[in-house]
Image: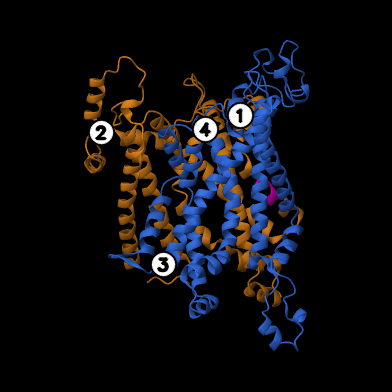
Chain colours: A blue, B orange
Amino acid sequence: MNEPKTSALSQATTMSLDPEAMAPPETPWQEFLRIFKKDYQALFGFWVLMILLVTALAGKALTEWWVVFDPEVVRLTDKFLPPFSIPSSDSLSIDRPFGGVYFMGTDELGRDVFARMFQGSFVSLSIGFVAVGISLGIGILLGGLAGFYGHVKLGFITIDTLIMRFTDAMMCFPTFFLILTAVALLPPSIYTIMIIIGLFSWMGTTRFVRAEFLSIRELDYVTAAKALGIPEARIIFRHMVPNALAPVFVSATIGVASAILTESGLSFLGFGVPPPDATWGNILSDGKGFIFDAPWLFFIPGMAIFIVVLAFNLVGEGLREALNPKLRSR
Amino acid sequence: MWNFILRNIGQRLILLIIVSFVAHSFIHLAPGEPSEVDPMNPRMKPEDIAKIRAAFHLDDPLHVQYAYWIRDLASGELKSFKDSQPVLPKIWDRFLNSLPLFILATILVWTWAFPAGIYGAVFRGGAYDRGTVFLSYALISVPGFFLSYLAILWVVGWFGVPVISIKTFGMEHAEPAYKVMDRVWHLVIPSVMAAIGGIAVLSRYVRSQMLEVLSQDYVRTARAKGLEEDTVIYGHALGNALLPFVTMFGLLLPGLIGGSVIFEQIFAWPGLGRLAYEAILSRDFPVIMTLNFIAAVLTLAGTLLSDILYAVVDPRIRLH
């Protein structure tokens, strides 16, 4: 990641030693890249995700600003057209889809599925990222508090007991049922869904960040930092957090995948993102009613979710392999 | 040993009390009330709503409502808001419906995940290993209802058997053999669908556990002293690799409620998951809270069971 820092003073004192020979054979970052690049599945997943990211950003921009991509245009003369069909001649030229062809067909209202999938890619992805962002934020904060300040007493119980018992209590509930209840009781909106999924999935992160912090706190370099009189906040955020982050990355990647799946499950039960916002989950769950008449409405979003979630899972697993020193040596 | 068990039970009872607080306040603090299920109905006058609220104690402060809930739950007189039926018998009926699904799915998970994972670990990096690992990722990446719909289409189209709901109506006077086959067909597809996720997750876990054990020194020693590979793997490594999974028996219990909402909805299976879904739709607070509470009790009982089992099975664990 970075060159070993050598100050002027140490260079002066170690002139006789060759700094090239002293440096480790490869930095952790190079080692990570070397292992990750050998993992074809993870690499495949990585490229799928890069393409998806570009698609999502382009989708957001184009569907907002460009009329031919407007996913909300209803063309009742063009209902249930299969993929690659030409719009009927009486539709207005301004309403025509991109390229004059419905690449992925149209749905029961004559909306262009390609445009809807395009818009949905951004919405689905942002649900995943926001939900994971929230759960990571809570998880790292609580886990870090319990791990570092766990021994501090608040009245008669320690902070560690307080946080971990609350975490245990939250883990007792079946997560999906809890999310479903909350989403059903709250007013339906895309933000509710993102926040609820995030609010109910931080427990795992809290537990392993705490475990990671507990073990890092005892390491020599933390003792050394304390002995140097470095302020606590700096020790935590500059020295401990980066070292505790490896498992967090892995669980974040897999968390995005499971948030996308959760959203599609909620859509299936009728508590998904309300229209007119399109997500892959609600295109799929709307499409299930037309599985015989218009199979493309079901298979296109289904396969899209499958490929993207698979890519996230493969990348997560590749990260786990590449970041875990125990698996590496074998 | 007894000391350990008693202290564990005590800790879990305290946790259970916290859980009941959380469940109760979570449901009641969320906006949306049972009296508002049908706000557009012109026949609902404000005095009717006031009557409903009074009957359900919805106007009392939270801690009073909590006391009512616990009292009714303990005395078994808790009534559903929706149809005034007692909650506990209602849940029990649905539990009995869910049970065969749960048992068959569990059996499928445990009989498929272990051979798949162990075989993959023993032949690490081979075609079979890479294939199953990729397949297990694929299976957890498919939305459950997408795969279920495909399975329904395939089974119904190919075999011409009905798979939705528990049984076919109008089969009451059929031959017993037909009746049994009917029930089996209805049971198998949802169980397989519910088991797929579990097989995928558990087999990967078994595989990594087995890999961990195979790299231990004592396995190398066993090989070095010239034991046959089968003896090394099945005699020395397997037992130690399987140890952690003893504890997972206990952790299965909560899956009874949580994992089944979507599958029971797809297959119109009148089990606990659908009861939960219906209760959420009608804002049936007593049923929702009681289901959450029972799920928590099952989870706690499961972890207790697994802690004890682990201590019994693994002599390296010291109880203190």
Q: Quadrant of the C terminus of chain B?
A: bottom left
Residue B157 relative to residue B303: left or right: right
For the residues labelled 1 and 4, the Cα–Cα distance comes to 10 Å
Residue position marked by numbered label 3 in the rendering: A149
Residue position marked by numbered label 1 in the rendering: A283
Q: Nearer the viewer, residue A53 or A2?
A: A2
Chain under numbered label 2: B
Give whichever of discs 3 and 4 has the lower sequence position: 3
Residue position marked by numbered label 4 in the rendering: A272
Badge 3 marks a residue whose secondary structure is loop
For the residues labelled 3 and 4, the Cα–Cα distance comes to 39 Å
What residue lies at 29% left-to-right and 18% top-to-bottom?
A: B44
For the residues labelled 3 and 1, the Cα–Cα distance comes to 46 Å
Badge 4 marks a residue whose secondary structure is loop
Q: Which mark is residue B58?
A: 2
**Residue A168 in the image, given as x and y percentages of width and height:** 40, 55
Q: Identify the magenta region.
A: B132-138
**Residue A207 in the image, given as x and y percentages of width and height:** 47, 59
